[in-house]
Image (cartoon, helix red, strand yellow):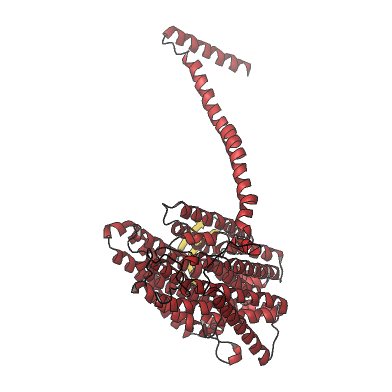
Amino acid sequence: MTNYFFLVTLLPLLGFFINLFFGKKINSEKVSGWLSSILVFIPFLITAYTLFDLLSIEPESRRILVNYFSWIVAGNLSVDYSFMIDPLSIAMVLVVTGVGFIIHVYSIGYMHGDNGYARYFAYLNLFIFAMLNLVLADNFLLVFLGWEGVGLCSYLLIGFWYEKKFTGDAAKKAFVVNRIGDFGFMIAMFIIFAHFGTLQISGFLEQISGFSVGDSLLVTISLLFFLGATGKSAQIPLFVWLPDAMAGPTPVSALIHAATMVTAGVYFVARCSLLYALSPISTNVILVVGILTAVLAATIALKQNDIKKILAYSTISQLGFMFIALGTFSYTVAIFHLITHAFFKGLLFLGSGSVIHGMHEEQDIRKMGGLKNKMKITFVTFFIGSLAISGIPPFAGFFSKDEILFKVFAHIGIPIYAIVLLTAAITAFYMFRLVALTFYGKPRYDTSKVTPHESPKVMTIPLIILAILSTIGGFIGMPHILHLPHLLESWFEPVFIDAKTIAATLSPETLYSMPVDLLIIIISICVAAASILIALKVFTAKEAFPPAKGFGKVLTNKYYVDEIYDTTVVEPIKNVSDKFLWNIFDNKIIDGLVNGVANYVSRLSVDWRKMQTGVIQDYATFTIIGIVAILIYLLLL
């Protein structure tokens, strides 16, 4: 089963080296693009084969630890390069390589003619390598290698068009903000090694299984890990990097900032589910942060006009939904929404890229309109993705989002359920505002300068595949009310069984009769459908866009969060750095000390140089004086 599994990470790394060192020599877009794509597709096939192998054995045996080599040995620290092959890691690898392959193929058309074509695919392959290490690792240090690796690749890909200043600024912002979360991750690792003597994930989870619920050590570790998760998964307060990250190529937004990297925090909390089940305080923090993030990002998306910025805030909001599921101890549901989100949000981002491509790089939806008949494949697939994220059956998002709503209703109660339901309604509204302004109504662009056109097949076929997945992907988690198998629940049961056992005593799920279950589903569908109809009616014929006023202006300016951060964090740090650290500490103290020593030695050498007269008698005198001084010293001892 695991004989060839090492190729899953090795092949994308090989693609990185080939494109980086030989890309310009190959000098062929098709070779670079298709080679990179194939080296991601083969790992997908290997993982699919491993999936069927795991299905053939008993559920309790579906966890295989593969140790490839000893990585770091220093004193008491011993870290192996080892993978944990289990239902959770297999599901994540299938998402990363499957959706990753589709986006690689799409990129072949989207990046056609770009000067950095081979370099772009080198970075994509390196990202896949880092992400696969993150989700397969059986020790925290290897997770951190992948964690930092995807951060590096994010920086490289956001700033890919480095000749533009704003892309460089966005890349630096993403890198710096993520370092804050990464600091929490590192401190958590240090604490784990200090107290448990290991960095192996499975070994750590085995040791904490006997700890009492609410243990302060576990709460501290879990909160520090969650700080890391808020950085990678763009949650409050570290969400500000993701909207700016849209400066990179659109396929990058689809791969890194919708389907894979930003879900790393969700995955990691699920991987450490036992830790969070034993830390209910941390789980409550996750719930609150998830709710606040989902509401904040959804409301901001209502007033954005950049097609990619709307999808960026939508991503932040949907990640909030995943953390809401984690905050109700519903780990399977969180991963379920992670999977369906990869399908429909990847589709929406690639669809937006197709629109931008067809509109000659225009991204403002106020300057679009009437594209439905100009870009038929893009329109149909984008419409399907919008229905999926809005929670309309039978599309994928309906099943996962409805399950989150039900878990909130059953675990938390009606008030919080109402807030989450309202957020879901806002999601449907802003998505179909986007659809209406982009595809419906009259053209609002200059028809003499812009001629919208459908994208080439290498871009539209990936859209069709993702549209199919967004349509049928939800059937792997059918509602219990239908009395049909919930495939994901049974698949993930061995991974989350210990955490679920503890969670059942902390937050028991209220059982409801079938009419209540059915009513929750009907309410969810009706609310989403009403939001869609209202959005289409209001924005289909809209032609004038007056400046926003009142609360609308606040939303347009994203609650002024960036401005608040600039005023309270960035500028004070810059001022301290400029006025004290640079002008005083660096220039006067550090440079003063170094330059002072140099000047002293220089002056001393001038004085000593005068003693070098070249006269032998003078040297003999100095020698005698030295001998006499030594004799006096010895006599006085």
Q: Residue furthest top?
A: 617
Residue 175 falls left or right of residue 569: left
| Quadrant of image for the C terminus | top right
Question: Based on the displayed image, in which of its 4 quarters is residue 126 positioned?
Answer: bottom left
- Name the residue located 55 percent from the left edge and 84 percent from the top edge: 490
Q: Who's the residue at 55% across and 91% down the image? A: 484
Residue 625 in picture, x, y percent from top left: 53, 11
Q: 253 or 427: which is nearer to us?
A: 427
Q: In this view, does 406 lie above or below 97?
A: below
**Quarter placement of the N terminus:** bottom left
On screen, residue 418 above or below 123:
below
Give percent across and percent down for residue 321.
60, 73
Q: Can you see residue 499?
A: yes
Residue 155 versus residue 35 in the image, above or below: above
Q: Quadrant of residue 47?
A: bottom left
- Relative depth, front residue between 202 and 221: 221
Residue 352's x, y, as percent? Answer: 45, 69
Residue nearest the viewer, comparing 277 with 458? 458
Residue 184 at what x, y percent from top left?
61, 58
